[in-house]
Amino acid sequence: MGKKGKKSKKAQEGKQKKLTPKDIGKRLDALVKKLEEELKGADLFVPLPPMEDCAICCIRMSRLEDRSFYQACCGKIICDGCYKENEEFVEKQNEQKKKPTILTCPFCRAPEPLSEEEYVRRLEARASQNDPDAFHILASDYLNGNVVPKDELRGLD
C-alpha cells in the first residue's frame, strides 16, 4: 500500500517553509535573548572605536554612511573625496580622448558595475568571503527592498 497524500523528503527539502508572523516573532525573541546575554555586564557608554582610514588617502572616515563608498569589487571603503576625485579624473580623460572611459574603482581599478544585478552579485561574492561590510549592505538592501526584492527574513539572517 502506497503513501498517498504524503510528500517525499526530497520534495519537502526543496521547498522553503513559509514563515508566519508567529515564526518571525519567535526568531526575533531568540535573537533578543541572545543579544541580552551578550550584553550582560557590558559598559554601553564607552567611547566608540575609531573609524577606519580611507584606503587611498589614509584620512579617518566619517561616521556618516553617505560620506563613504563601499567598493564591492575589492571590499575597500573609500572616502567621498577620493570617489569624487576619481570621477573627475575619468571625466578629464573623456574630454581629452573624446571617447567615453569606464568609471573604475580607484583602489583596484576594476570597472564599476553596469547594472544593479551585477552590483548585487559582487556583494554576494564579497559576503561569501565573510566580508562584514558586504553582509551589512546586503542585509539593509533586503530589509528596505532597495536593489533586491524586499525580504525581511533574508535581511535578518
Image: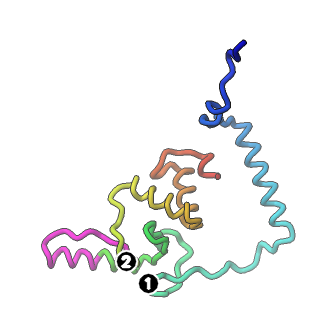
Q: Position of residue 115 (x, y in %)?
A: 35, 55
Rendering colour mode: rainbow
Instruction: Give the answer, above or below, for where 104 lies relative to 61.
Output: above
Q: Give whichever of 114, 21 is nearer the camera.
A: 114
Q: Residue at x 55, y 62 (%)?
A: 127
Alpha carbon separation for disc pair 2 and 1 = 8 Å
Instruction: Give the answer, above or below, for where 10 lies relative to 120.
Output: above
Instruction: Give the answer, above or below, for where 26 lies relative to 61.
Output: above
Circle 2: residue type: Pro
**What crowding class fits label 2: few (fewer than 14 Cα within 10 Å), some (14-19), or many (20 or more)?**
many
* Residues rendered magenta in the picture: 88-106
Q: Which residue appears farthest toward the right when viewing the image?
A: 41
Q: Position of residue 92 (x, y in %)?
A: 21, 78
Q: Residue at x 53, y 57 (%)?
A: 138
Secondary structure category for the residue under label 2 = loop
Mark found first going from the N terminus, 2 or 1: 1
Circle 1: residue type: Ile
The residue wearing badge 2 is 106
Secondary structure category for the residue under label 1 = loop
| Residue 31: in magenta span | no
Q: Indicate the quadrant containing the N terminus: top left, top right, bottom left or bottom right.
A: top right
The residue wearing badge 1 is 56
| Residue 90: in magenta span | yes
Total tally of numbered discs in the picture: 2
Q: Which residue appears farthest toward the front when viewing the image?
A: 1
Q: Position of residue 110 (x, y in %)?
A: 36, 71
Instruction: Give the answer, above or below, for where 2 lies relative to 133.
Output: above
Q: Are marks 2 and 1 in contact (CB under 8 Å)?
A: yes
- Looking at the image, residue 5 sits to the left or right of residue 40; the answer is left
Q: Residue at x 45, y 61 (%)?
A: 122
